[in-house]
Amino acid sequence: MDTKRISSKLEQALSAQMNVEDLQSHVYLSYGIWATDKGYNGIGNFLFRHAQEERNHAIKFMEYILNRGGKPKVEALPAPGNDPKNLADCFNLVFKHEVENTEKIYALVDLAFAEKDWATWNFLQWFVKEQIEEESLAMDLIDKLNIAGGDQATDESLFTLDQTLAKMPDEAEMARNATAENP
């Protein structure tokens, strides 16, 4: 008996988005490594936690596809790209990635609507809301850096920004607290 309750087209599109979320995780991981290497440990850890959140998003897509009787396909991921030039570039790239991801989520919502797959349409509403939060967070990073002085920020204001982001709440566990049993 065939138990698949999702079209092949949606299955492939959701699987592709699973891989996009995984790539986003790698991008945030690479930015976190860059920030930590530059001495911004708080910003680095914030980005590491965000990398974990993006991985969790990939897992949500994987689980949904499996629960609908489909089989997600893990694809090879491209390299995350070059390191940011500075903090302003880093935060602008974060915003750019989030806007691009929002566009991909909207395309999935359109596809689910066109196919009248209301279960998938409903599932995707969580991601629509999440992308509003993600874009707002990215804009907040840019605003905080601008308030600190932008490219002309003093070491003291960058230190304060670094400390602020280290304490910022996040959905994902602190990266340094992760274990094999509790990723």
Image (cartoon, helix red, strand yellow):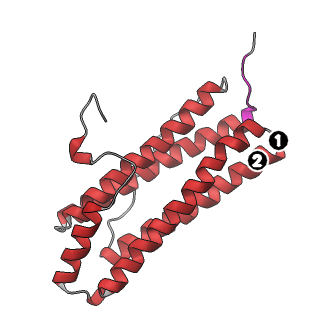
Answer left or right for 42 relative to 80: left
Q: Magenta residues?
A: 3-9
Q: Which label was assigned to residue 160? A: none
Contact between marks 1 and 2 (CB within 8 A): the answer is yes
Camera sees residue 75: no
Which residue occupies 43% across, 69% down?
Answer: 93
Q: Which amino acid type is shown beneath numbered disc 2?
A: Leu
Which residue occupies 63% across, 40% down?
Answer: 14
Which residue occupies 21% across, 46% down?
Answer: 176
Q: Is mark 1 on a helix, strand or loop?
A: loop
Magenta-highlighted stretch: main secondary structure? Answer: loop
Image quarter where the C terminus lies is: top left
Answer left or right for 133 relative to 11: left
Alpha carbon separation for disc pair 1 and 2: 6 Å
Residue behind mark 2: 111
Q: Is residue 128 above or below residue 141?
A: above
Q: Which amino acid type is shown beneath numbered disc 1?
A: Glu
Which residue occupies 55% across, 30% down?
Answer: 63
Q: Where is residue 178 in the image (x, y as percent from the top left)?
A: 25, 39
Rendered image quadrant of residue 56: top left
Q: What element carries label 2?
A: helix
Residue behind mark 1: 115
